[in-house]
Image (spheres, grey):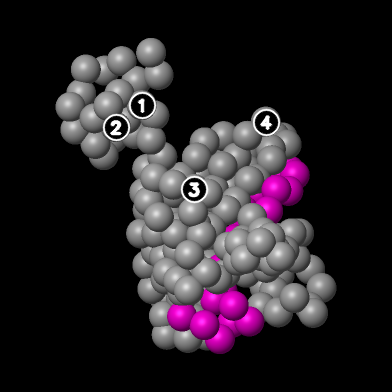
Amino acid sequence: EQCDDGNVADGEGCSATCALKSPEVPETEPNDIQANATPSGLNGTGRVTLVGANQPSGDDDVYRLRVPAGQSLTLSARTYTQQGQPLSCDRMLTDTRMFVEPAGTEVTDPSQAGALAYNDDIDNAGNVWCSAVSVALTGGAAGTDYFVRIQGWQDTQTTQYLLDLELSP
């Protein structure tokens, strides 16, 4: 019922098994500052999966999303390792930290002020070193851009990751 279009191919939002699937967006370099952010394609409610890597070591990846005018939405964001398995986290490949930033405020270190949300490890004690945040965002009179920044651990590790972004009411 979710995707009754009779398709037999992946790639347009429904899988070949007729289930909803987030579109996948590859990162584009350079995307280490807000001015060069990779567009996520999110402009209001929806979900997208981004494919990225912090290479070389110390590289930041920044993604842009938009909350339309007058809307209040919740951003849920999570990094993970294996495609189709958003709870997977291989700590050797995907040890990330994540910042959610308002436009004009670039936060590259947890000691800096200005991030709307930050996470280094989902569960440090359980060795789940991927990142996840949930934060309420509001669209101003003309809509508002927000940015998600992904770094390797302590901004010194080369990482590979998938990033799910979802805006919901």
Badge number at residue 15: 2
Q: Which amino acid does label 1 sit on?
A: Ala
Q: Reading the chain from its start, which is encountered first: label 3 or label 1?
A: 1
Q: Which amino acid does label 3 sit on?
A: Pro
Mark 2 neighbour density, 10 Å: few (under 14) some (14–19) many (20 or more): some
Q: Reading the chain from its start, which is encountered first: label 4 or label 3?
A: 3
Q: For mark 4, what is the residue?
A: 169
Does any portion of residue 37 appear in the rendered image?
no
Q: Find residue 88 and report its horizontal and vertical position in percent.
A: 49, 54
Q: Reading the chain from its start, which is encountered first: label 4 or label 2?
A: 2
Badge number at residue 11: none
Badge number at residue 86: 3
Q: What residue type is labelled 2?
A: Ser
Please state which of the two labelled residues, at mark 3 or mark 1, is closer to the viewer. 3
Name the residue rendered at 78%, 78% in the picture.
Answer: 112
**Residues rendered magenta in the picture:** 133-158
Q: Is residue 151 magenta?
A: yes
Q: Reading the chain from its start, which is encountered first: label 2 or label 3?
A: 2
Image-based side of 49 in relation to 12, left or right: right
Q: Distance between the residues labelled 4 and 3?
A: 21 Å
Q: Find residue 135 and report its horizontal and vertical position in percent.
A: 73, 48
Name the residue rendered at 37%, 67% in the picture.
Answer: 28
Q: Reading the chain from its start, which is encountered first: label 1 or label 4?
A: 1
Contact check, label 4 and label 3, Cβ < 8 Å: no
